[in-house]
Amino acid sequence: MIKNISWWEYDYFLRDCEFLILGAGIVGLSTAIELLDREPDAKVTVIDSSGIYKGASTRNAGFACFGSPSELLFDISENGEELCIELLRKRYQGLTILKERIGSQIDYQETGGVELPQSNSKFEYYLSKLPYLNDLISEALGLQNCFSVQEGFFGREIFNRWEGKLNPMKMIVGLENMVREKGGRLLRGLDINSVDIKNKKLNTGIGEIDYKNLVICTNGFTKEILPDIDLLPARNQVLVSNPITSINLKSCYHMNEGYVYFRMVDHRLVIGGLRNLNIENETTSNLGLTDEISGSLEQLANKIMNGKLKEKLSFPIKWSGIMGVSKDKMPIIKDIGNNTYLGVKLGGMGVALGSYVARELVNYITGCNTQEA
């Protein structure tokens, strides 16, 4: 039984829906676009439990990146070179698709990315590995001399000229508009309780919804509806400072194997991460802030900017977002039975991977690709 929804709403959003997509982030919206490009007359509805955005798609720092030296070296040590190369290709392909699709709408700027090692010994170690990493990226992506050493604002820096930054909110709004322009439906604020894959029913706040094809793109929140999935939620906390006019950093900055990142936006410093200080506590799908993480981010920001600013730093704007992670960082793209499909686990690289995952997911759904990613 459907309740608390009008006939007109039911008829528009949910009646005879050919493709029901859970999750209105970058993967869910991009999946809808890919489906409508291939099947323009299909009835496609994207639903999301949040009226206001709460996933990582609009709560990231707007980095268009595919991996800093310390992060890539860590990934290789944990999962091997072959897997790292495969992930690099997926991330770069995803960024290419995104820029081709709505690049003019997202304030994209190829400003480059900078690695700031935390010590001189780490810096020298990364320097010794740059030829190896450049060869790796040349093989994986065809990009020559990706990493180089430069004199920057913080002294000697490792620079990646192929990375950039964008506006995550404009990215999602652009994708939403494209879904609607192509005839798709977007329904927000509908509580999703559980999925009955065997009987092809979605249990929601308005009752049970039948579906023909269900596509789950809920990333960090997926474990709430599929408890056995090999994916963990991961909370990242982000801070934005008071206005700063004494400096203007143009690049995006990475530290500590990707666990810390910062950039400037609208003359303010944006800094986020440090969930590695308490992985257990930050392995959660609950939005929120902790004094431990946010306080440490403030201290780190002041340490990084010590003596470089005329202004005193304060952080009046703070938030958190939820990612979907696992050790191998490889996205899950699969059929889980009875016309129900899964495209999740972006590993903190949703901006880069999201469009790629959507395209491969639709290849899988439409039978264009029989190999699971």
Image: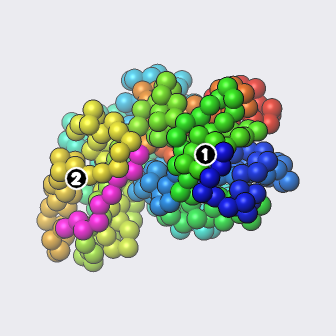
Lower sequence index among marks 1 and 2: 1
Magenta highlight on residue 3: no
Indicate the position of residue 297 as horizontal and vertical percent values: 22, 53
Q: Residue at x 76, y 51 (%)?
A: 15
In the picture, the disc for residue 207 is: 1
Q: Residue at x 35, y 60 (%)?
A: 263
Quadrant including the C terminus: top right
Q: Nearer the viewer, residue 52 or 172?
A: 52
The stretch in magenta equals: 314-322
- Give the residue at mark 2: 294
Q: Nearer the viewer, residue 335 or 313?
A: 335
Which amino acid, mark 1? Gly
Element type at mark 1: strand
Residue 80 appears left or right of 19: left
Residue 163 appears left or right of 250: right
Residue 269 appears left or right of 94: left
Residue 119 appears left or right of 353: left
Which amino acid, mark 2? Ser
